[in-house]
Amino acid sequence: MFHAASSPGQNRTPLTQARPSAPGVPSPRPPAEPGGRPGKQRDAFFDNAKYLAIVLVAMGHSWEPLKGDSRILEAAYTVVYSFHMPAFIIISGFFSRSFDTRPDRLKRLVTGVVVPYVLFETAYSVFARVVGHAADQEISLLDPWYLTWFLCALFVWRLTTPLWKLVRRPLPVALGIAMLASVSPAIGDDLDLQRVLQFLPYFVLGLTLRPEHFRLVRRRSVRILSVPVLAVALAFGWWAVPRMNTAWFYHRDSAQELGAPWWAGPVMTLAMFGCSLLLTACFYAWVPGRRMWFTALGAGTLYGYLLHGFLVKAGTYGGWFDHPWLHRPLGVTAVTVLAAAVVTALCTPPVRRVLRFAMEPEMKWAFRQDAAQLARERERSQGRTPQREKAGSGAA
């Protein structure tokens, strides 16, 4: 269970900093306390939520080539797409509350977000050219392709975190920016800024949340109410399939680019934000708060997120989804189970150990060493406790 004392900025006793267990994944590894004692445990709820959200992402991607033949599947796809990324982004914002321009945090931002973006953007572009025979696919770090937009967005959001902590009403300001972006086709595709700006309110909301807010939506009453809410959402999705452009859920285009009048952009931004928050609350209500068999996989969700895209694209390029059997209910079920199993396997420790060089590189050679950090490490290695830690222990 997440305790208020363990949230960033509230624990006054400094702990040894640890690198995040996966770049872009919001919660860090539990740090070790001075003297070798084990640090605070990761909160199972957030790891469970991240894992379940990334499974929904993989399922949604596996449904995309199949949904054209089934109105029911398209309705389910629409409902899932309305909240799976908001749920993940809100948690990312929640665990970014302590981000500042301290050197060690800027280093982690570079090694955990920028470097994986460069590597995977290049890898996806080469993959599209070689496997997909897309001769016109260019390697461009300014135009994120497929899944890498999230790393771009996370980089921008994290860099602006200190600014959002200064603003008196950050969420209304972020919503205003998202609404303006939805009527600004001139923004273009560079760095996928439409998505960066239109998803921004969810990240800012995460920055403003406290542990007790998550506990509120995990009450039994909310869990019960979430069942009819989800049923209504599925019914609305079924009704909206022939009447609504599902591209609104991607947040990657302005209203004009979707063939809608300009005023539809702000209206849809607010409507989508409200619907997404409601369904995200329903999702959180059913996330287990105790340790489960998949809890440890929550630390490797970005691995599963970035890697499963190669398999989905390989299936698209190879025509795997064209088999008629896969478009029947049993085939869709098989594809869904397979997608969940594959992304689960990609989040496991063996995969993370093999690809840590790309996802979590240390790159000590690229950075100057922080004199203050070196002094703290030297004192610890000599068995002395830094003065700040002594003061913190006395205050406790």
Image: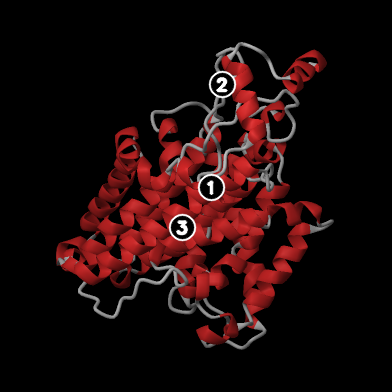
* Along the viewing direction, whichever of 148 and 87 lies nearer the viewer: 148
Q: Is residue 226 visible?
A: no
Side (left or right) of 281 relative to 295: right
What amino acid is at disc 1?
Val
Mark 1 element type? helix
**Does residue 193 lie above or below 386 as drawn?**
below
Q: Which residue is mark 3?
A: 80
Q: Which residue is mark 2?
A: 32
Q: CA distance from mark 3 to mark 1?
A: 15 Å
**Does residue 357 lie above or below 159 as drawn?**
above
Q: Which residue is mark 1?
A: 227
Q: Position of residue 14 (x, y in %)?
A: 69, 25
Side (left or right) of 210 relative to 359: right
Mark 3 in CB contact with mark 1 (< 8 angstroms): no
The mark that comes first in sequence, 2 or 1, is 2
* Along the viewing direction, whichever of 321 and 171 lies nearer the viewer: 171
Location of residue 51 (image quadrant):
top left
Q: Quadrant of the N terminus?
A: top right
* Along the viewing direction, whichever of 134 and 72 lies nearer the viewer: 134
**Other-residue count near label 3 (Cα within 10 Å), few / some / many at <14 / 14–19 / ≥20:** many
